[in-house]
Image (cartoon, grey):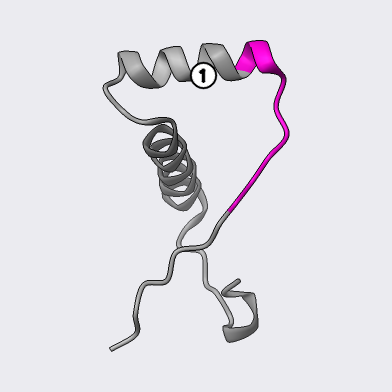
Amino acid sequence: MKKDRKKHFSIRINEELLKKFHYVAKYEDRSASGQIMFLINTCVREFEEKYGPVELDKGEEK
């Protein structure tokens, strides 16, 4: 069975926007990391609903 390995992802963000993001995450009862994962999953789900499943080649699983 393939193990689900987590990857680290970092971004640069304006301090004011980051504070607002933390406010929204807290309002939604999520951590900042949880909010980011929610947004990424929503983005991918909506994309796949519109265009179909994203097929990954072995070399693209990074």
Membership of 2 in magenta stretch: no
Q: Quadrant of residue 29?
A: top left
* Residue nearer the viewer, 24 or 56: 24
User: For residue 19, what is the image quadrant?
Assistant: top right
Residue depicted at 68% across the width and 40% down the height: 11
Examine the rendered structure and indicate whether residue 52 appears above or below residue 49: below
The percent coordinates of residue 32 (x first, y second) are: 43, 31
- The residue wearing badge 1 is 21
The reply to whether the magenta stretch includes residue 10 is yes
Vertical placement of 13 versus 16: above or below?
below
Position of the N terminus, as image quadrant, is bottom left
Of residues 50 and 43, the one nearer the viewer is: 43
Q: Position of residue 8 (x, y in %)?
A: 56, 56
Which residue range is magenta in the image? 9-17
What amino acid is at disc 1? Phe
Mark 1, secondary structure of its residue: helix
Name the foreground residue: 52 vs 35: 35
Picture coordinates of residue 62, whole percent (x, y): 60, 71
Q: Main secondary structure of the magenta part?
A: loop
Query: Residue most toward the bottom?
Result: 1
Taking 19 as reference, is 24 left or right?
A: left
